[in-house]
Image: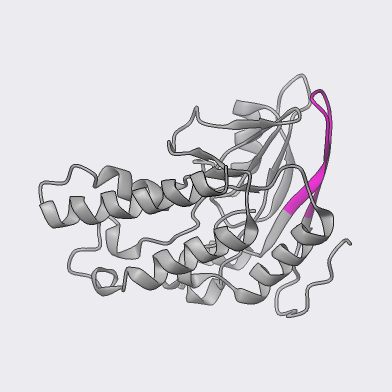
Amino acid sequence: MGCSHGDKIDHLAADAVIKFRDALKPDTVVHLGDFIDTAAFRSGAQGSEDESTPVRPDIDSGLAFLKALRPTIICNGNHEARLWRLKHHHNAVVSELANQIIESFRSLAKSMKSDYMEKWDINNYRMVGNYKVMHGYMFGENATRDHADVHGNIIHAHTHRPAMAQGRRDESATGYCVGTLSNIPAMEYASTRRSTHAWAQGFVWGEYTEKQSVFWLHVQPKGQKEWVLPI
């Protein structure tokens, strides 16, 4: 799962995913990134409402969800990457805060013995069975197919649009997008975008060996509060 976005998380979705995790007892649990929102840290925040967005509730909520989820792999997404870009900011207050928050992520990952992928780029992924898992970086209607075109079998987040698509490759690669776990109406920056109608909550689960995998995409119907889980 991914894109839970700190204090913008949907708590019903979070509870459902943790319930499923506890029941399934999986060997591998992956948070695909954007576990915080970092609105105040985005490059265009200065002079906007985002600049006044409280930082502490966002960080605390993101870390609380990770603690409850207990992922074995944690990815950084583009929202966490904002902090890494500010590590050496010319404003000492900004750089110090960014570094302190980064250290809190590292400390939690270490305490849970999680594999923490700090880089967010086109080459950073881990293997789960014969699938790559990464936050993702492409967008648009065909983002999941495009990720499969480039990387082969892949599970990603980033677009908030649950999807399964076949890549245009001779080995018949499959791509999955997990959707989001955020409270979608709370994502104000997307409130006037038509593509937001395609966003939905979900996660991917399945079985794997080193050579083969079978995964399923679970999508929560919009407007349905109760999660009917495959357990």
Residue 126 in picture, x, y percent from top left: 61, 31
Residue 80 in picture, x, y percent from top left: 40, 50
Q: At 70% from the left edge and 27% from the top edge, which residue is drawn? A: 168
* Vertical order, 198 against 204 (above or below): below
Q: Over which residues does the magenta segment extend?
A: 204-217
* Vertical order, 123 against 30 (above or below): above
Q: Is residue 213 magenta?
A: yes
Viewer-nearest residue: 179 or 16: 16
Q: Is residue 190 visible?
A: no
Q: At 48% from the left edge and 69% from the top edge, which residue is drawn? A: 61
Viewer-nearest residue: 112 or 73: 112
Q: Is residue 160 magenta?
A: no
Q: At 48% from the left edge and 63% from the top edge, which residue is drawn? A: 62
Left-right relation of 214 to 81: right
Q: At 31% from the left edge and 44% from the top edge, which residue is drawn? A: 84
Provide the major secondary structure of the magenta segment: strand
* Corner quadrant of residue 24: bottom right
Left-right relation of 164 to 151: right
